[in-house]
Image: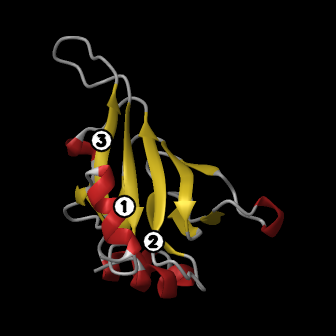
Amino acid sequence: MDEAEIIIARLGLAPLPDEGGFFRRAWTAPAAPGARPAGTSILYLVTPAGFSAMHRLQTDEIWHFHAGDPLALMWLTPARAIERVTLGADIAAGHQPQAVVPGGAWQGARLADGASRGWSLVGCTLAPGWDEKEFFLGDRVALCREFPAAADEIVRLTR
């Protein structure tokens, strides 16, 4: 087994449908009857093939770096801004330990260029919690048309 397979097994991660990568819900806050949870968080493992495909949520999402290779996170705002952050442990090299992607932005993540271990472990937190009805998977052609300056990265972050 390679290192990523060991982490997947030890943390009890499963493939994340549509978006890609491997995950396990780590926390769900209580919810009022009939309401969504106040908050949720997941452990999320990214590999070269299991990247986080471009998607949009209505809720802000906080990404937390835990271990492994640095993670290249990109989001595209409704105002057409392109934001890029490298999540990682090397603060002196410009890595960030966490980043907040605003609700309504298209977002995706992959291993940063030069990754050597072949995996990155992060956590993702939402408040209010996850609601499947608010998840939208990005379309490569439409996103490239809307954000031509980010087309190369969009291609790398869509299936």
Q: Which mark, by number, is residue 7?
A: 1
Q: Position of residue 68 (x, y in %)?
A: 54, 66
Measure how far apart labels 3 and 1 are at the Cα level: 15 Å
Q: Residue at x 55, y 82 (%)?
A: 116
User: Which quarter of the picture shows residue 2?
Assistant: bottom left
Q: Which mark, by number, is residue 25?
A: 3
User: Which quarter of the picture shows residue 90?
Assistant: bottom right
- Tell me the mark number nearer the camera, choosing from 2 and 3: 2
Tag 1's secondary structure?
Answer: helix
Residue extending farthest to the left is 34
Which image quarter is the C terminus in?
bottom left
- Asked whether, in this view, residue 97 is left or right of residue 53, the answer is right
Residue 50 lies, with reference to residue 121, above or below; the image says below
**45 or 137: nearer the viewer:** 45
- Asked whether, in this view, residue 135 is left or right of residue 148, the answer is left
Sequence order check: which comes first, mark 3 or mark 1?
1
**As shown in the figure, which amino acid type bears the numbered disc 3?**
Arg
Which image quarter is the N terminus in?
bottom left
Read off the residue under disc 2.
119
**As shown in the figure, which amino acid type bears the numbered disc 2?**
Trp
Tag 2's secondary structure?
Answer: loop
For label 1, the crowd category at 10 Å Cα-Cα, with few meaning under 14, some 14 to 19 and many 20 or more, is some
- Asked whether, in this view, residue 122 is left or right of residue 34, the answer is right
Q: Position of residue 119 (x, y in %)?
A: 45, 71
Q: Residue at x 36, y 22 (%)?
A: 38
Q: Which mark, by number, is residue 26?
A: none
Tag 3's secondary structure?
Answer: strand
Q: Residue at x 50, y 76 (%)?
A: 147
Kindly check if marks 2 and 1 are in contact, taking CB atoms under 8 A apart as contact.
Answer: yes
